[in-house]
Image (cartoon, rainbow, N blue to C red):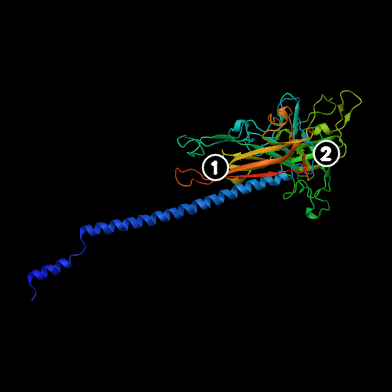
């Protein structure tokens, strides 16, 4: 027989957990769950950061490799020393680079790093000297975009990185070399890709007309391998060398026009019309025509000696941080539209080792060869890009997004150096 007292004791043992026990169990479960969630979040963050850093490093490597490859062949197939560009008696329009024949805002690298559309920063008229010179490596110290990294509270900025407020002007470089892909042996041509094509030049009217030898293969108007509007042609004969910008490829196949209108590079200036006497200026296609030197000054005759023509590659590298919400490394060839080649490249800097043959010394890490520091040969000598023996490249890339909200961007810097062998390469061994 079960007594009431025994029954009550049995019921109390079946009553379940107390409130205190439930609260303790819930707290322990919450702590364990929170720890698991935190560990999962950390693993996701690590994976995200690793992916961002891998992409960032790959972008930096691509940027370095492309610039290195072009610098290595700077000056290939071209005469030593650079090239005189046209300059109409020191008056504008001046020769310039970084400009595009197809854009309503043609110049992409502008004075002071402002948005595209202003005056080109790659202006090759040296004020006061009546001289415009295109070197095969053209340093442009601090002429690129202003890379701004203001505080997070600053509005209207592309890069709101809270840990820095540094504003850095980026560098620009222009590299020139012969294009050995045109003319070529495509389509059954027996010509070597290194051959120069014979052409006749007519400057009697406007535009300048260049007629290629009918045996040129592929023809200039070949849709796949021919010339394009915006290409730069190099002319060479016994009177000298010159460059011009293609503005029209005529449908006839072997004639291209070089007009002053539609030439954003201002290479097509006709300085010496037939019958005009020279007045000490040089450059431009008309400067390599024949002149009557029995009179003083010499008089332009409008005829040309045997002239060879080939296409050159004039490539400019610069940072664009205006077009999109992230900075990009741009590569522009001749007067064609620029192409983005690496994303999230936010800084580009160059320095140059200059070989001073008169003093027998090399001045390292000069940002601007035209204005060397006092530590280089007393700073009294102004050098030229022809004396570049080595180019030092600095590229800084950032991640595509911040590591975590408000924690800034991961960054990586890469450095490389190249000795262009067609400038003033010096073998010390």
Task: Answer left or right for 17 relative to 108.
Answer: left
Observer-nearest of 429 and 18: 429
Q: Single out the residue that lies furthest toward the bottom.
A: 1
Asked if marks 1 and 2 touch (Cβ < 8 Å), the reply is no
To which residue does mark 1 refer? 326
Element marked by disc 1: loop
Quadrant where the N terminus lies?
bottom left
Quadrant where the C terminus lies?
top right
Query: Percent position (x, y) of residue 112?
Result: 60, 31
Observer-nearest of 95 and 50: 50
Cα separation, mark 1 vs mark 2, equals: 43 Å
Q: Single out the residue that lies furthest toward the right.
A: 294
To which residue does mark 2 refer? 236
Judge whether residue 297 can be spotted in this image: yes
Task: Answer left or right for 194 relative to 19.
Answer: right
Query: Percent position (x, y) of residue 378?
Result: 72, 28
């Amino acid at each position: 027989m079960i007594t009431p007292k025994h029954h009550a004791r049995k019921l109390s043992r079946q009553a379940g957990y107390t409130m205190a026990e439930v609260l303790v169990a819930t707290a322990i479960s919450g702590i364990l769950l929170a720890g698991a969630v935190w560990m999962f979040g950390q693993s996701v963050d690590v994976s995200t950061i690793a992916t961002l850093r891998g992409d960032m490093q790959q972008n930096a490597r691509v940027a370095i490799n492309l610039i290195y490859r072009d610098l290595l062949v700077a000056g290939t197939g071209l005469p030593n020393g650079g090239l005189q560009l046209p300059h109409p008696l020191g008056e504008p329009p001046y020769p310039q680079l970084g400009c595009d024949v197809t854009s309503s805002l043609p110049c992409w690298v502008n004075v002071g790093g402002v948005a595209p559309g202003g005056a080109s920063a790659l202006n090759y008229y040296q004020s006061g000297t009546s001289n415009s010179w295109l070197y095969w490596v053209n340093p442009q110290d601090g002429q690129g975009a202003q890379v701004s990294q203001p505080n997070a509270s600053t509005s209207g900025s592309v890069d709101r990185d809270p840990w820095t407020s540094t504003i850095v002007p980026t560098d620009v470089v222009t590299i020139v070399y012969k294009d050995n892909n045109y003319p070529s042996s495509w389509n059954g041509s027996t010509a070597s890709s290194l051959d120069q094509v014979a052409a006749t030049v007519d400057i009697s009217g406007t535009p300048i007309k260049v007629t290629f030898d009918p045996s040129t293969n592929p023809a200039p108007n070949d849709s796949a391998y021919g010339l394009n509007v915006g290409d730069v042609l190099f002319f060479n004969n016994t009177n000298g060398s010159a460059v011009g910008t293609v503005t029209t490829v005529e449908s006839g196949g072997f004639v291209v026009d070089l007009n002053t209108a539609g030439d954003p590079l201002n290479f097509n200036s006709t300085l010496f019309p037939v019958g005009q006497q020279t007045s000490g200026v040089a450059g431009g296609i008309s400067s390599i025509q024949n002149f009557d030197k029995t009179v003083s000054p010499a008089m332009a005759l409008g005829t040309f000696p045997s002239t060879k023509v080939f296409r050159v590659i004039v490539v400019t590298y610069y940072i664009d941080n205006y077009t999109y919400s992230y900075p990009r490394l741009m590569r522009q060839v001749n007067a064609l539209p620029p192409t983005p080649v690496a994303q999230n490249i936010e800084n580009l800097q160059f320095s140059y080792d200059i070989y001073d043959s008169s003093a027998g010394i090399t001045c390292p890490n000069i940002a601007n060869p035209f204005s060397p520091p006092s530590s280089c040969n007393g700073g009294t000598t102004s050098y030229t890009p022809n004396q570049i023996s080595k180019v030092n490249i600095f590229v800084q890339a950032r991640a595509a997004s911040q590591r975590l909200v408000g924690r800034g961007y991961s960054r990586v810097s890469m450095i490389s150096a190249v000795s262009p062998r067609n400038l003033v390469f010096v073998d010390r061994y």
